Each structure stands twice: as C-alpha cells, then as structure tokens.
Image (cartoon, grey):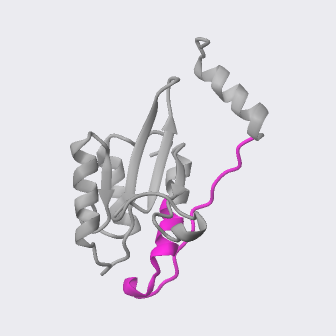
C-alpha cells in the first residue's frame, strides 16, 4: 500500500467525487419537540456529521429477510458512521437516534452493551446525550471526535 499523505487523499477524493459541496444544516420546524419525527432529527444529525467528514450509513436491520432485504441484529443502532483516517484505518461510531420522548427498548440497550464490550463506540440519544440537536452538538463537542469547524 502506498504511503499516502492527506494531500494525496484530498486530491484523489476530488478526482473521484468532484469538488465538495457545502452542507446546509436542516432547520427543524418550530414545533413541540415531541411532534418532530425521528427521521427529521436523524437527517439533521447526518448533515452535522457530514460537515465533520463522517459518512453516515442508515442501517436497515432485520426488515424483510424473506426478500433478502436488511441486515443486522435485533437492537442494532440506526446509523453506522465511518470517518476515514490514515489508511487503512477508520473511525467507527454507531448511533441510535431518538426523538424527545422516544423510548429506548431493552434489546437496543443490550445490543449497545455487547458492542461496547467488544470495544465499539456507540451512543444512544436520550441515554448518552439529550435527544435534541443541541444535546447532540454539546455531546459531540465534548467527545473529542469533533474536527472540522467545531
């Protein structure tokens, strides 16, 4: 494997993907927080993470195995986030999103516990940080993961 510099990676990414486009954060509607859907919150978090060079992949665990759709395990997190570093290394973060008032199920807590015991970095909205965009931002800034413009 070649000894790549960050400039090599940046140049190669621009050749393959083109010039990066600025990501505009979604502004959540002024509603009662309990009326905001988990999907809307997840979209906002995804845009914030993309600004810090994470690639967020929506998981679809165990949705319809009869058609070969979905992968994963009961309780698996909603999102798998990857951020590439010095090759061949990458950072991995599993995130379970919840809207304000959203319920964390026992099987989700168990899945996160098992992954953490394996050494994984996992977080659950409403457990590890308040289930809100400001709550996530405060947690993320304090986590040591923040890099670009935070």
Instruction: Report if residue 121 is visible in the image.
Output: yes
Image-quadrant location for residue 53:
top right
Q: Residue at x 43, y 37 (%)?
A: 91
- Is 60 within the magenta? no
- Residue 59 in the image: above or below residue 5: below
Quadrant into which the N terminus falls:
top right
Q: Residue at x 51, y 24 (%)?
A: 88
Q: Residue at x 70, y 33 (%)?
A: 13
Read off the magenta span.
19-45
Residue 10 lies, in percent from the top left, at 66, 28
Q: Nearer the viewer, residue 19 or 123?
A: 123
- Residue 125 in the image: above or below residue 83: below
- Residue 81 in the image: above or below residue 3: below
Q: Residue at x 32, y 40 (%)?
A: 144
- Is 41 within the magenta? yes
Q: Residue furthest front?
A: 66
């Amino acid at each position: 494997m070649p000894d790549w510099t960050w400039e090599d990676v940046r140049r190669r990414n621009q050749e393959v993907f083109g010039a990066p486009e600025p990501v505009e954060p979604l502004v959540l509607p002024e509603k009662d927080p309990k009326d905001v859907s988990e999907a809307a919150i997840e979209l906002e978090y995804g845009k914030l993470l993309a600004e810090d060079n994470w690639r967020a992949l929506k998981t679809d665990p165990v949705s319809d195995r009869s058609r070969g759709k979905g992968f994963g395990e009961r309780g698996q997190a909603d999102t798998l986030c990857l951020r590439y570093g010095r090759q061949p290394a990458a950072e991995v973060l599993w995130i379970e999103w919840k809207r304000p008032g959203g319920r964390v199920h026992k099987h989700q807590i168990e899945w996160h516990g098992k992954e953490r015991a394996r050494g994984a970095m996992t977080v659950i909205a409403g457990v590890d940080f308040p289930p809100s965009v400001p709550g996530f931002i405060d947690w993320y800034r304090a986590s040591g993961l923040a890099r670009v413009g935070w």
